[in-house]
Image: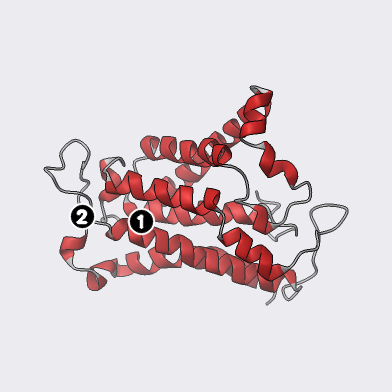
């Protein structure tokens, strides 16, 4: 049973979009004037109307729920309650105060304030493609997969650019993140403003404009992506690491 439990984390991370799209449950929860069923171009044809914050709010809540699930899972996993622990680094896992590290992680302006600001600005000012404002169609898993693969490729490219283009760019952007030579999960968003802009915000913006998903696919992708970024910094080998 303990070998199965870790894998339940993934549906838990996206539990909000899964629950609300099942049998179109969102229609029972929210008034019809809180959302659009058809794609809507607010940037070019808004007629003085701004997008409803419903989709934006649900997306942020989905990420928060996912983060709660990840932190709960990791605290339990770290205790060895789901099997034998193997460390990523041969020197072993770093020693740290769990409570202090969690507070530090959740208070990172680069990871949460900047990303939250990006999400709010692009949504409320109608900068997203029209399809993103549509609540119809449920979760399109092909679109979710395309977003995950594309943003990962773009992030890899940005990472390599920061390392190789110019030493001054590396010092300004990515070097602060590499002070963690033996990283832990709570170091995931501890970087710099420049690093977050280049490695997270630009890839997200490009992905949104290349993959025209609906709000549910965007929400599912966003929660998976944000929480996956934490999990890949884990100091312990996770059951699914061989797949990724």
Relative to residue 225, is residue 85 drawn left or right? right
Q: At x 29% / y 55%, what residue is drawn?
A: 137
Query: Which residue is outermost to the top?
Result: 166
Relative vertical location of residue 117 with respect to residue 170 in this rendering, above or below: below
Q: Residue at x 47, y 36 (%)?
A: 202
Q: Name the disc covering residue 216, or none.
A: 1
**Residue 93: x percent and y percent?**
81, 59
Which element is circle 1 on?
helix
Residue 37 disc label: 2
Q: Position of residue 30 (x, y in %)?
A: 23, 69
Q: Residue at x 45, y 41 (%)?
A: 204
Observer able to see residue 149: yes
State the colouring used for the structure image: secondary structure
Badge 1: residue crowd in 10 Å (few <14, some 14–19, many ≥20): many
x, y percentage for residue 194? 55, 37
Label 1 vs 2, first from the N-terminus: 2
User: What count of labels does the image hold?
Assistant: 2
The disc label shown at residue 52, or none: none
Is the Cβ of the residue at disc 1 closer than 8 Å to that at disc 2? no
The reply to whether residue 3 is visible in this rendering is no
Q: Is residue 200 left or right of residue 80?
A: left
Going by the image, does 193 lie left or right of 32? right
The crowding category of the residue bearing disc 2, from other C-alpha atoms within 10 Å (few below 14, some 14 to 19, many at least 20), is some
- Seen in the image, is 37 located left or right of residue 74? left
How far, Cα to Cα, is label 1 from label 2? 12 Å
């Amino acid at each position: 049973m303990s070998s199965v439990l870790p894998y339940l984390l993934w549906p838990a991370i996206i539990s909000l979009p899964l629950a609300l799209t099942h049998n179109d449950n969102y229609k029972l929860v929210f008034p019809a004037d809180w959302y659009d069923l058809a794609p809507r171009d607010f940037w070019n044809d808004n007629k003085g109307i701004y997008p409803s914050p419903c989709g934006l709010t649900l997306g942020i809540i989905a990420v928060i729920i996912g983060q709660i699930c990840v932190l709960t899972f990791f605290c339990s996993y770290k205790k060895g309650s789901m099997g034998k622990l193997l460390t990523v680094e041969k020197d072993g896992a770093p020693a740290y105060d769990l409570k202090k590290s969690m507070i530090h992680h959740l208070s990172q302006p680069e990871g949460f304030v900047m990303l939250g600001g990006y999400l709010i600005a692009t949504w409320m000012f109608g900068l997203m493609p029209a399809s993103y404002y549509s609540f119809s169609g449920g979760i399109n898993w092909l679109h979710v997969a395309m977003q995950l693969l594309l943003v990962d490729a773009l992030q890899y490219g940005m990472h390599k650019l920061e390392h190789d283009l110019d030493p001054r760019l590396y010092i300004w952007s990515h070097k602060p993140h590499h002070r963690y030579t033996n990283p832990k999960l709570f170091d995931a968003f501890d970087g710099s403003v420049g690093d977050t802009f280049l490695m997270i915000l630009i890839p997200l913006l490009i992905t949104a404009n290349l993959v025209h998903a609906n709000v549910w696919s965007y929400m599912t992708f966003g929660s998976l992506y944000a929480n996956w970024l934490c999990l890949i910094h884990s100091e312990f080998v996770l059951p699914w690491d061989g797949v990724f």
